[in-house]
Image (cartoon, rainbow, N blue to C red):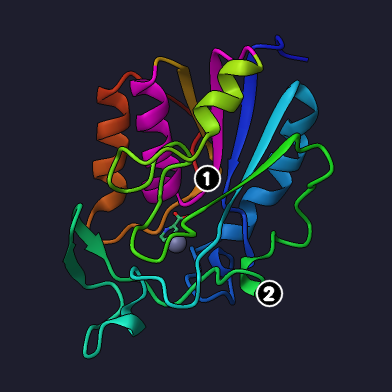
Amino acid sequence: MRPASDALIVIDVQNDFCPGGALAVEKGDAVVAPINAMMDDYAVCVLTQDWHPQNHHSFAAQHPGAEPFSMIEMAYGPQVLWPTHCVQGSPGAAFHPDLRTDPADLILRKGFRPEIDSYSAFFENDQTTPTGLQGYLRSRGVASVTLVGLATDFCVGWSALDAARLGFVVTVDLSACRAIDLDGSLARSLEQMRGAGVTLVGSA
Ligand code: VGL
Ligand code: ZN
């Protein structure tokens, strides 16, 4: 068992990010077994869920003529347009059926505001709207976080960068992560995480 100040944060292990899902990450389901095995080591365990309304502005379908995986300019900066995914209450938004959810102390949902996407578990993509996770972790005495889940180069990566910026000691265990890798996004994300002082362990 790790010290009580260490939290495990499991990012978006949902059906839509696994093979057969709407925004499938290659071998996304391979993270489930290692994550299940890690959970009992941590006194604090948080699961996140990407949780979008049907009319979410990050969906290509909301922008007539736009292709999935193309870029658009939002009020807060550039944004990838995604296939419709993780719609609130849909089977795709549910956790992978084999993911252990009983050990979780908190399930945090993000991305529920139609006009703004939220990759990070800490802040939405405007980098100022908080999700509340920072306050939760601080009030439980957490100083150090280990991040795992999907996808390495989007929600895991942005969460790691925000956690580091907020002063948490951050580790990403790549053996329990898988990436989307859109136009070199994985290499960029790993480089940014290293530059921010995030400790990368394991490999996919
Ligand atoms: C994610 C793209 C869109 C993720 C969520 O969980 O990495 N990626 N929404
Ligand atoms: Zn999303």
The part of the image, by quadrant, that contains residue 144 is top right
Whether residue 3 sits left or right of residue 72 in the image: it is: right
Q: Amino acid at mark 2?
A: Pro
Q: Is residue 168 above or below residue 181?
A: above
The part of the image, by quadrant, that contains residue 72 is bottom left
Q: Amino acid at mark 1?
A: Cys
Considering depth in this image, is 120 or 133 the residue closer to the camera?
Answer: 133
**Relative image position of residue 188 (x, y in whole percent):** 24, 43
**Relative image position of residue 4 (x, y in whole percent):** 71, 12
Residue at point 50%, 66% (across, down)? 52
Residue at point 21%, 90% (across, down)? 65
Residue at point 24%, 89% (across, down)? 64
Question: For the image shown, how many numbered marks are present on the structure?
Answer: 2
Q: Is residue 25 visible to us here? A: yes
Considering depth in this image, is 31 or 160 the residue closer to the camera?
Answer: 160
Ligand 1's quadrant is bottom left
**Relative image position of residue 58 (x, y in whole percent):** 34, 68
> Rounded to the nearest whole Å, what is the CA distance between mark 1 and mark 2?
22 Å
Q: Is residue 89 above or below residue 126?
A: below
Circle 1 SS class: strand
Tag shown at residue 177: 1
Tag shown at residue 91: 2
Whether residue 60 sits left or right of residue 170 in the image: it is: left
Q: Is residue 58 above or below residue 68?
A: above
The part of the image, by quadrant, that contains residue 182 is bottom left
Q: Which residues are magenta?
A: 141-166
**Residue 156 is covered by the magenta coloring:** yes
